[in-house]
Every structure is written in C-alpha cells, then in structure tokens.
C-alpha cells in the first residue's frame, strides 16, 4: 500500500481530535454538533447531504457454488 501524506495527516488530525475527548465518540459528535450550530448562527453556510443507501451484501447462503 502506498503511503499518502494527506491521508496520514487527516488520520493524525482525527486521532488528535478524538484524544481531546478520551476517544469518546459520543462526546466528539456532540462537540461537532455544537460547532455546526454555532457556525449556522454566525451565518456561515453549512452543507448537509442525505445519507447514502447501501446495497445489502450477498449472504454466504445465497452464493452459488462452482
């Protein structure tokens, strides 16, 4: 696998951010929601996209043998 410095930097930043909350995902999500609300109140444009629907994976039972 090729090392990508941009991906490495993004992962380090994410890990540092989560470390602030003791790797508590719920606390980090609450902080992000609070920051989003503050940005909206300040008149900044916040983008929101609908969730992507995932196709169900083929189960082992449904696979054809041979």
Image (cartoon, rainbow, N blue to C red):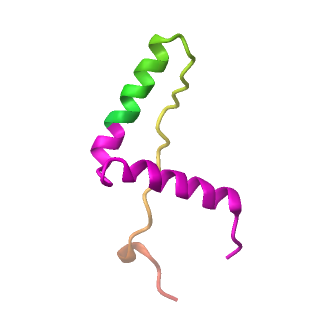
Q: State the residue at coordinates (47%, 44%).
A: 53
Residue 41: image quadrant is top left
* Residue 60 x/y as whole percent: 38, 76
Q: Is 34 rendered above or below residue 27?
A: above
* Residue 1 x/y as whole percent: 67, 76
Q: State the residue at coordinates (47%, 16%).
A: 40
* Residue 5 x/y as whole percent: 70, 61
Q: Nearer the viewer, residue 5 or 66?
A: 5
> How many numbered marks are there?
0
1 sits to left or right of 55: right
Of helix, strand and loop, which mostly describes the magenta segment? Answer: helix
Q: Nearer the viewer, residue 61 or 25?
A: 25
* Residue 19 x/y as whole percent: 38, 53
User: Does 8 lie within the magenta span?
Assistant: yes
4 sits to left or right of 41: right
Q: Is 20 rendered above or below residue 49?
A: below
What segment carries the magenta color?
A: 1-29
Q: Is 1 rendered above or below residue 50?
A: below
User: Does 9 lie within the magenta span?
Assistant: yes
Q: Nearer the viewer, residue 64 or 8?
A: 8
Q: State the residue at coordinates (55%, 25%).
A: 47
43 sits to left or right of 56: right
50 sits to left or right of 32: right
Q: Is 59 rendered above or below residue 34?
A: below
Q: State the residue at coordinates (40%, 73%).
A: 62
């Amino acid at each position: 696998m090729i090392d990508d410095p941009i991906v490495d930097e993004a992962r380090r930043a994410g890990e540092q951010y989560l470390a602030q909350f003791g790797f508590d995902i719920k606390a980090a999500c609450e902080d992000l929601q609070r920051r989003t609300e503050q940005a909206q109140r300040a008149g900044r444009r916040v983008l929101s996209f609908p969730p992507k629907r995932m196709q169900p994976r083929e189960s082992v039972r449904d696979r054809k043998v041979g």
